[in-house]
Image: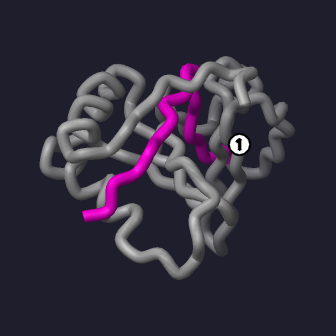
Amino acid sequence: MTTLTLRAHEQLLAVATPGPGTEPELPASGPVNAELVTGNDRTLVFAYRDVAELSDSSIVQGPFRALEIAGPLDFSLTGVLAAVLSPLAEREVSVFTLSTFDTDWILVGANALPDAVDTLRRAGHTVVEHFEGEH
């Protein structure tokens, strides 16, 4: 089994799809900010405090808290996400995942974070609180 170190970030995050025809410019102020565009969908991840910047036709989920797998992770590694997501799935903790070049991010509902952290620790992982501004 792969054991990992994860950082639990304090800042609240939102996941949204902006309303049709809108192009919001959100400040990059969270521990992770993302925009993913497919042929059918545009998904944004950003600081929850900026939700008011979206149009009323936007669909927003959250607030979330981020768990960042300590990286960088080598592209040849296998089972990294499975090692984190399997115990969370068994505990019925819903997740939204993102991958960057260096690591993977798991977003869980802000209220579910204590349960997620406890579950991951019981699975053998290390979870540390990470306060924004720390390096």
Counting from the top left corner in percent of width and height, residue 129 is at 49, 23
Query: Is residue 2 located in the magenta-colored stretch of the structure?
Result: yes
**How many labels sit on residues?**
1
Residue positioned 41% across, 24% down in the render: 110
Q: Is residue 95 left or right of residue 36?
A: left
Query: Is residue 42 located in the magenta-colored stretch of the structure?
Result: no
Vertical arrangement, residue 33 with respect to residue 82, above or below: above
Q: Residue furthest bottom?
A: 76
Q: Is residue 27 left or right of residue 130?
A: right
Vertical arrangement, residue 55 with respect to residue 41, above or below: above
Question: Relative to the observer, which residue lies in front, 14 or 66?
Answer: 66
Question: Relative to the observer, which residue lies in front, 44 or 28?
Answer: 28
Question: Relative to the observer, which residue lies in front, 92 or 1?
Answer: 1
The image quarter in which residue 24 lies: top right
Residue positioned 65% across, 29% down in the render: 56
Counting from the top left corner in percent of width and height, residue 113 is at 35, 27
Counting from the top left corner in percent of width and height, residue 58 is at 62, 38
- In the image, the segment drawn in magenta is 1-19
Which color scheme did the rendering employ for the protein? one colour
- The quadrant of the rendering that contains the N terminus is bottom left
Residue positioned 66% across, 57% down in the render: 42
Q: Which residue is mark 1?
A: 33
- The quadrant of the rendering that contains the C terminus is top right
Question: Relative to the observer, which residue lies in front, 3 or 20?
Answer: 3
